[in-house]
Amino acid sequence: MKKTVSFFLAMVLTLGLSFPAAGVTVPADPLDYIDFQFAPEKSEYAAGEEIIIHWKLSVKAFAEFEDADLSMSYSSSDTYLTAGEVYEHYDRLDYGDARTSTFSLFEDESVVAQSERFGRLIRRIVQFFVHLFSLFSPALRRMDYQNSLLKEDFCTGVQAAFSPRRCVSVGVCRVLYDGREITCRFMFSYGRFHTVPLRPAEETGRAEGRYSVSAAITPDNTGVSGLLFGASLSDGAASGGLFFLDAVNGRLGLAELKNGETTILAVKNAALTPGQVRSVSLHIADGRLTAYLDETETENWPVFDLFVPFGDGSVGVCGNATKPVIGDAEERFSGETYANPLYEDSADPYVLYDDGVYYMYATNCPTGYCASRSTDLVHWEPIGQVAHKDDIYGDESFWAPEVYKYRGRYYLFYTTDMHLAVAVADSPEGPFVKTSDSPLFEQRAIDGNVFFDDDGKAYLYVVHYDQFGGQLWGYELAEDLTSVKQETGVLLAKAEGWEDRTIEGPYMIKHGGVYYLTYSGSQFESVNYAVGYLTSDRPLGKFTRYAYNPILQSTSDIHGPGHHSFAYSPDGSELFIVYHCHYSLTQPMPRKLCIDRVKFVPTGNGPDRMVVLGPTATPQPLPSGS
């Protein structure tokens, strides 16, 4: 069919700013899975003669392509041609499917006429837009669909892994037209692309529900790429699990797919560079999944460790990934284990290690504070009430206790009725008594955390509030720890982004000469409640947020990981974060105690990266030295 130049220009100019860059990024090479054969009917054509090219397309491997097109574009330096039928559309192209067709090129008289009128320069411009329209015309039918991929909804983005438009060149042929060379390029475009080998048990003879699967994934800037496991396909919709890399939004995660619907099981922000190959390995055993990214002998912590509702089924890839490799699921560790959550009714936990015993103080008593003790961070026994409102400042709302041993005595920093106060005792088991009839600050202040630097100075980190939400402040403490040097106060951070007006529960830890100020963000009853951190080279210096916060957030096993402290294992070799989580996946309170391992990973440029293996609900080795 012939189109006028004005129609071409109008369409291109209207769509030019909104049309996604279709057909510029090539995922896992479809040439491994399709067979395309083509040939011109003859090699030379006279002026005005139709150019006919015969072709045949078939699938030669166990693969599936959804909503596939075969389109043709052309180029020539001296002639102006329009494709008579620019694409062949398939609703589905399955294994063994093959078709043969022809289409023709012919000289567009309207283009020639306008070329003569506007001269050689205009002819080139017109030719460019005609060529551009011919190239994109198969995809114009999907403008609404393409725009839907730009939605902010993350689940939509994951599901889009199975249906973004992909395009790759599958062949080039050249013919002579009126003595001038015409180059024809064939482009194969498809919506879904899966390579799904046999089920692991059938392929290897291994027991069902226990295997490993790995692949090299190269995230790009067009969508999500990932590794499927426990999967099945029905009418083109995948069900099962997906470990995905999303370089567009800088996230990786685990998702459950059910007949086209997506549920996020776990997600983390991460530095994912489009075009950078990443190694992914999954270990599935007895309903448990451990997922590794770029695993090496020294970098061998899973990025995710959780229970999954699937294990058997096929494995495969979507997007830009190599064919998966199936192997044995090795035992990751042996010996005695623990599993979160560990202890009931333990909100805002703070752990003090003193003379071989861990003491935990929490928000769990309406008339003051109770405590528990342990020798291994896992098995806890109650001590009873260690501070009563009759002996300390405040009447109600006793929150977030923290206890520090200083010069032979024990100092309790706590929140009561939105104010911060101090009490003291001669034993970690109390009884604590007030040091003043007044709080440390006249203004509202909660969640005090004390940090002792290498030079002996003590600093207090606290949360103040204004009309815009929470703020983290830092102060120097007086030598007796019972008052604050108000003039030293520095605003360190305000709630922003995912923190949703709430930034609380600060905790300072020093590593490699860098100050790491961790905190909790978002509303404490929300599933979005999570942990992030900031870094600085000074205890009250300018702090910078870690670019990929939060570092500890909800999964399908544990919701609401937040207010926390840190403690070392009994032998001092392992660092643990001690935090609370929601009571269940549907009920936030009373909150429960969890612990998980923490490490610092060198980045090669800037402070080491703080990494939390968690939240976990699967069995974990006991803290070293237990």
Image (cartoon, rainbow, N blue to C red):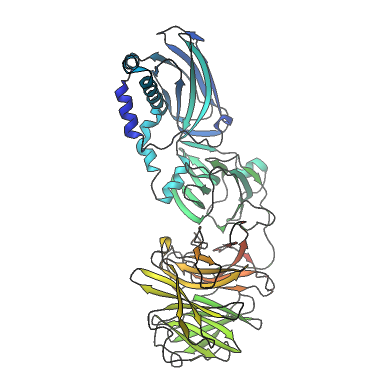
Residue at point 43% right, 36% down?
21
Q: Quadrant of the N terminus?
A: top left
- Left or right: residue 352 versus residue 66 is right
302 over 492 or under it: above or below: above
The x, y position of residue 506, in whole percent, is 49, 72
The x, y position of residue 400, in whole percent, is 47, 78
Q: Quadrant of the C terminus?
A: bottom right
614 over 201 or under it: above or below: below
How many numbered callouts?
A: 0
Q: Nearer the viewer, residue 284 or 298?
A: 298
Q: Nearer the viewer, residue 397 or 121?
A: 121
- Left or right: residue 467 versus residue 287 is left
The x, y position of residue 341, in whole percent, is 54, 69
**Location of residue 407 by image quarter:** bottom right
393 over 85 or under it: above or below: below
Which residue occupies the extreme top position in the image?
46
Is any atom of residue 192 visible in this view?
yes
The x, y position of residue 9, in whole percent, is 32, 27
Residue at point 41% right, 71% down?
471
**Location of residue 615 by image quarter:** bottom right
Is any atom of residue 612 visible in this view?
no
